Amino acid sequence: MNLSRSDTPAPALLVGVDLGLPHFDHQLVELADLARTAGLDPVARLTCKRQAPDAALFVGSGKALEIKALAEAHGALEILFDQALSPAQQRNLERELGLPVYDRTLVILEIFAQRARSHEGKLQVELARLQYLSTRLVRRWSHLERQRGGIGARGGPGETQIELDRRMIGEAVRRTKERLEQVKRQRHTQRRRRDSGSHFGISLVGYTNAGKSTLFNALVKARAYAADQLFATLDTTTRQLYLGDAQGRGRSVSLSDTVGFIRDLPHGLIEAFQATLQEAAQAQLLLHVVDAANPDHPEQIEQVMRVLHEIGADQVPHLLVFNKIDDLPPERMPLSLHDHYLIDERPVERVFVSAKTGAGLPLLRQALAERALPSPPENWAQSEH
């Protein structure tokens, strides 16, 4: 089930099917980024249009022959689809093409498996992979057709290998869920301790590679891993951030850097990462980081809001941070670094920054202080004199 992890990336053919959905990526740019991150080398790309996926091959028999010819011409050893494939479609395509076939879901799962560092993160990825695997047991293993029976045979008389594998995976899923539930209870206890005081929690959220970790490091002087790649950070990191205002008031708040989102983030991953994503759902403020230089940022905002809705965090107060203004051409530079942006017809406060150069960060700190610091009493100014 693992993609190539050798020193030499395996050549891969990228396939995208335009089913009439909005924002179809005709250049397969994001899929190519995912492929490289997972250790593949995109050597060719093919897109086609269909009104609906073919039940057997997703693309139809004629297009499958075209994919096979293109793969042979470019020496591709693996086929990567930009959409999720059913187990039957994946199996039929591999039989038709004679090559391993992966879908977007598996590639994202593979990246998460490579990047998870903490015990919790590894558990979350393992659960998502097990749930994905449980639907694809008949994909490649010829031994699954054999019967394992007889006295003393593992699994009981007449139990097929596939039934045994399903039972073993089911048990592994149950154990992993139990361990994650324990982690969730520990997080809840830690959060309750924090909330017993005057805790104010801020969570960074956003599309992957929007620069969340770079902004996190710039705000709290931390050394969290940050790189220009997809899903550079999977594990939640929390640090204290001191905020002060012009009147000399100040307080420390907690700032958490969370996993990035992406289009068509596998539902199994959203489910598995519930414990981590609860940091966002339980926060008092979300810093929604956006790559201002990416022309697709409106769609990326929409995708992030969709995941936030799924985890129950869409009603948490937002502050939009349009990052990477250092990558903007002069004609696209904002007239003001502080304004409002409409999300679902609601104006949301927005600040433009460059986490890389520090531009706009004082303005962001000021906006955070206004949110995090309690309003002074009306006679506060007089009482100071």
Image (spheres, rainbow, N blue to C red):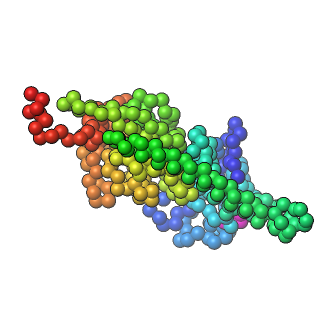
Query: In the image shown, does 106 or 180 lie closer to the viewer?
Result: 180
At 67% from the left edge and 63% from the top edge, which residue is drawn? Answer: 135
Instruction: Look at the image and give the residue range highlighted in magenta.
Output: 89-93
* Side (left or right) of 89 relative to 363: right
Place residue 313 in its image quadrant: bottom left
Depth order, front residue of 179/38: 179
Query: What residue is at 47 percent from the left and 64 percent from the top?
Result: 21
Q: Report if residue 92 lies within the magenta region.
A: yes
Give the total number of marks visible in the rendering.
0
- In percent of width and height, residue 267 lies at 54, 59
Q: Is residue 189 above or below residue 128?
A: above
Q: Is 4 placed left or right of 15 in the picture?
A: right
The quadrant in which residue 366 appears is top left
Residue 154 percent coordinates (x, y): 84, 60
Task: From the top left corner, tell me how far across and down residue 327 is, in percent.
Answer: 39, 37
Of residues 68 and 333, the one drawn nearer to the viewer in this rendering: 333
Residue 325 visible in the current orientation: no
Q: Residue at x 37, y 44 (%)?
A: 195
Q: At 65% from the left edge and 54% from the top edge, which residue is drawn?
A: 175
